[in-house]
Image: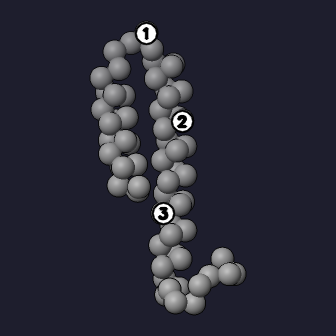
Amino acid sequence: MADQPTNLPAGFYIIISNLTEVQCAFKRSKKNLKALNCAMSPYPLEKYAAMNANLKASEACLR
Protein backbone atom coordinates (compact mmCIF):
# COMPACT_ATOMS: atom_id res chain seq x y z
CA MET A 1 0.00 0.00 0.00
CA ALA A 2 2.97 2.32 0.51
CA ASP A 3 3.58 2.72 -3.23
CA GLN A 4 0.06 3.94 -4.12
CA PRO A 5 -0.17 6.21 -7.15
CA THR A 6 -1.00 9.68 -5.87
CA ASN A 7 -3.62 10.38 -8.56
CA LEU A 8 -6.22 8.18 -6.81
CA PRO A 9 -8.08 9.15 -3.63
CA ALA A 10 -7.18 7.30 -0.42
CA GLY A 11 -10.77 6.06 -0.08
CA PHE A 12 -10.31 4.10 -3.28
CA TYR A 13 -7.77 1.83 -1.59
CA ILE A 14 -10.11 1.25 1.35
CA ILE A 15 -12.79 0.07 -1.11
CA ILE A 16 -10.29 -2.22 -2.88
CA SER A 17 -9.07 -3.79 0.36
CA ASN A 18 -12.67 -4.26 1.60
CA LEU A 19 -13.59 -5.98 -1.68
CA THR A 20 -10.58 -8.27 -1.31
CA GLU A 21 -11.73 -9.10 2.22
CA VAL A 22 -15.26 -9.87 0.98
CA GLN A 23 -13.90 -12.03 -1.82
CA CYS A 24 -11.81 -14.04 0.66
CA ALA A 25 -14.90 -14.51 2.83
CA PHE A 26 -16.81 -15.85 -0.18
CA LYS A 27 -13.98 -18.25 -1.01
CA ARG A 28 -14.08 -19.54 2.58
CA SER A 29 -17.89 -19.86 2.39
CA LYS A 30 -17.63 -21.75 -0.87
CA LYS A 31 -15.08 -24.14 0.64
CA ASN A 32 -17.36 -24.65 3.67
CA LEU A 33 -20.32 -25.22 1.36
CA LYS A 34 -18.39 -27.88 -0.59
CA ALA A 35 -17.52 -29.64 2.68
CA LEU A 36 -21.17 -29.42 3.70
CA ASN A 37 -22.28 -30.85 0.33
CA CYS A 38 -19.90 -33.78 0.82
CA ALA A 39 -21.21 -34.37 4.34
CA MET A 40 -24.82 -34.17 3.11
CA SER A 41 -24.29 -36.17 -0.09
CA PRO A 42 -26.65 -39.06 0.84
CA TYR A 43 -29.48 -36.52 1.31
CA PRO A 44 -31.35 -34.16 -1.07
CA LEU A 45 -29.23 -31.08 -1.83
CA GLU A 46 -31.84 -28.63 -3.16
CA LYS A 47 -31.32 -26.28 -0.21
CA TYR A 48 -27.53 -26.32 -0.62
CA ALA A 49 -27.77 -25.92 -4.39
CA ALA A 50 -29.81 -22.75 -3.79
CA MET A 51 -27.18 -21.49 -1.32
CA ASN A 52 -24.47 -22.26 -3.87
CA ALA A 53 -26.38 -20.34 -6.58
CA ASN A 54 -26.66 -17.33 -4.25
CA LEU A 55 -22.95 -17.56 -3.53
CA LYS A 56 -22.11 -17.69 -7.26
CA ALA A 57 -24.34 -14.65 -7.91
CA SER A 58 -22.60 -12.75 -5.11
CA GLU A 59 -19.18 -13.75 -6.45
CA ALA A 60 -20.16 -12.54 -9.92
CA CYS A 61 -20.85 -9.08 -8.43
CA LEU A 62 -17.27 -8.94 -7.15
CA ARG A 63 -15.70 -9.55 -10.58
Q: Residue at x 35, y 55 (%)?
A: 61
Q: Residue at x 68, y 81 (%)?
A: 3
Q: Residue at x 47, y 72 (%)?
A: 15
Name the front one of labels 2 and 1.
2
Q: Looking at numbered disc 2 in the image, what kind of residue is underneath it?
A: Lys
Q: Looking at numbered disc 3 in the image, what kind of residue is underneath it?
A: Leu
Name the front one of labels 3 and 1.
3
In the rendered image of this protein, does residue 18 appear above or below residue 51? below
Label 2 to label 1: alpha-carbon separation: 19 Å
Question: In the picture, residue 17 is in which quadrant?
Answer: bottom right
Q: Neighbour class for label 3 at 10 Å: few (<14), some, many (≥20)?
A: some
| Left or right: 3 as drawn, with respect to 54 | right
Residue lying furthest bottom in this view? 6
Q: Secondary structure at mark 1?
A: loop
Measured as percent of width and height from the top left, residue 29 is found at 49, 41
Q: Point out the tag, 2 or 1, that comes first from the N-terminus.
A: 2
Residue that carries the numbered disc 1 in the rendered image: 42
Residue that carries the numbered disc 3 in the rendered image: 19
Q: Secondary structure at mark 2?
A: helix
Label 2 to label 3: alpha-carbon separation: 18 Å
Q: Which mark is residue 31?
A: 2
The quarter of the rendered structure image containing the N terminus is: bottom right
Are the residues at dot 3 and dot 1 in contact (C-beta closer than 8 Å)?
Answer: no
The quarter of the rendered structure image containing the C terminus is: bottom left
Q: Which mark is residue 55?
A: none
Q: Neighbour class for label 2 at 10 Å: few (<14), some, many (≥20)?
A: few
